[in-house]
Image (cartoon, helix red, strand yellow):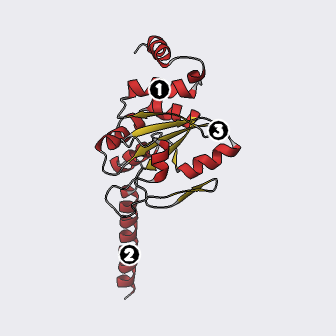
Amino acid sequence: MKINRSIGILLLIILTTSLAAQTTTATTPNTPTNSITSTASTIPKINWMSFEQAYELNKTRPKMIFVDVYTDWCGWCKRMDATTFTAPEVVAYMNQHFYAVKLNAERQDTVVIDGVIFVNSNPGSGRGSHQLAIELLRGKMSYPSYAFLNEKSQLLTVVPGYQPTKEFEPILHYFGEGAYITEKWENFRAGFQENSGQ
């Protein structure tokens, strides 16, 4: 009887040790799944926020506001997200110099900015535009479009259409550096391309 009990305890110890070893192996940080996950989580991304958040932050910590006006059905918007907005140089510059906003031009909710109410006049319809998007784009509803606002939340300009990284970078710098105040765009772009070797 004692021998059977000893063998049973020994088998239980061996089984427990074997299961613990398997569990440790399955969660080892060197497995391909874990290394991919940890690499993906360290890739820098643009710190996107809502228009309301950026507007309120700008009251106490003034900064330029960049608004990406998009729609869910816009293929060029998705391409911009997958390419230009993931380029490390764009991500770093955007996060440093702008409050970056994602604004769905067809959002369904009500937005109140300093007592002014903005709504989607055709809520529930397939492609009804939100009044905030209409205001920012001055009624020229094309997607994607990018609105640049100064530190006082005043609209400076709107740049429409998909922008590859090399074309988008000088636009960001033109506004981020405040060059739009004293320099013509054409001159700035030519100098930027010369200085960056593009």
Q: Quadrant of residue 62?
A: top right
The residue pinned by badge 2 equals 12
Report the front residue among 29 and 194.
Answer: 194
Residue located 49% across and 50% down the image: 132
In the image, residue 80 lies at what x, y percent? 36, 38
In the image, residue 194 lies at what x, y percent? 45, 10
Considering only order in the chain, which callout, 3 or 1, is on the residue closer to the N terminus? 3
Report the front residue among 92 and 69.
Answer: 69
Disc 1 secondary structure class: helix
Disc 3 secondary structure class: loop
In the picture, the disc for residue 171 is: 1
Considering only order in the chain, which callout, 2 or 3, is on the residue closer to the N terminus? 2
Mark 2: give few (<14), some (14-19) or many (20+) Cα within 10 Å.
Answer: few
Numbered label tally = 3
The residue pinned by badge 3 equals 152
In the image, residue 86 lies at what x, y percent? 41, 37
Disc 3 residue type (three-letter): Lys
Report the front residue among 26 and 4.
Answer: 26
